Amino acid sequence: MATSTSIKLPKGLKERVRAIAEDENRSSNWVMTDAINRHVEHKEERKALRDKLRAAHDDYQRTGLHLTQEEVEEWMAKRAAGERAPMPKPHT
C-alpha cells in the first residue's frame, strides 16, 4: 500500500521532473518514485558490498590467507582462454 509524503524540491526541479514525465508519458509521481527507488537500491547495493568487503578483510586479518595479483591474473588468463583451470588455493 502506498503512503503519501511531501518533500521540498529545489527551485526548478519540479518543472524538470514534469518535463521528463511528459516526455515519457508518465506522471511526475511515477518519475520521482522511480528515481527514489533506484537511488535507495543503489545505496543498499553499496552497503551490501561494503559489508562483504569488511567481512573479507576481517577474514584476511584473522587467517592471513590470500592470493597474489600474479596468481589471480594467471588464473584469469587461463579462464579467458577457455581452460577449466581451478582457482588457485589461498596461502599465507
Image: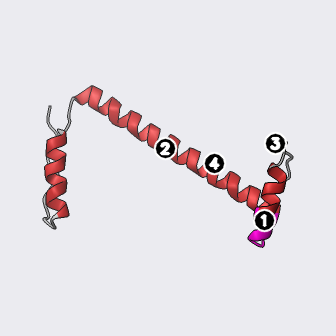
For label 3, the crowd category at 10 Å Cα-Cα, with few meaning under 14, some 14 to 19 and many 20 or more, is few
Specify which label sits upstream in the sequence, 4 or 3: 3
Residue identified by numbered label 3: 10
Q: Which mark is residue 21?
A: 1
Amino acid under disc 1: Ala
Q: Nearer the viewer, mark 2 or mark 4?
A: 4
- At 39% from the left and 38% from the top, the residue drawn is 53
Dots 1 and 3: beta carbons under 8 Å? Answer: no
Residue 91 lies in magenta, yes or no? no
Circle nearer the N terminus (1, 3): 3
Residue bounds of the magenta highlight: 20-27
Q: Where, by quadrant of the figure, is residue 3 drawn?
A: bottom right
Front position among marks 4 and 1: 1
The three-letter code of the residue at mark 3 reads Pro
**Label 1, label 2: how far apart the Cα atoms are:** 31 Å
Helix, strand or loop at mark 2: helix
Q: Which residue is mark 2?
A: 48
Q: Which residue is mark 4?
A: 40
Dot 3: what SS? loop
| x 17%, y 38%: residue | 68
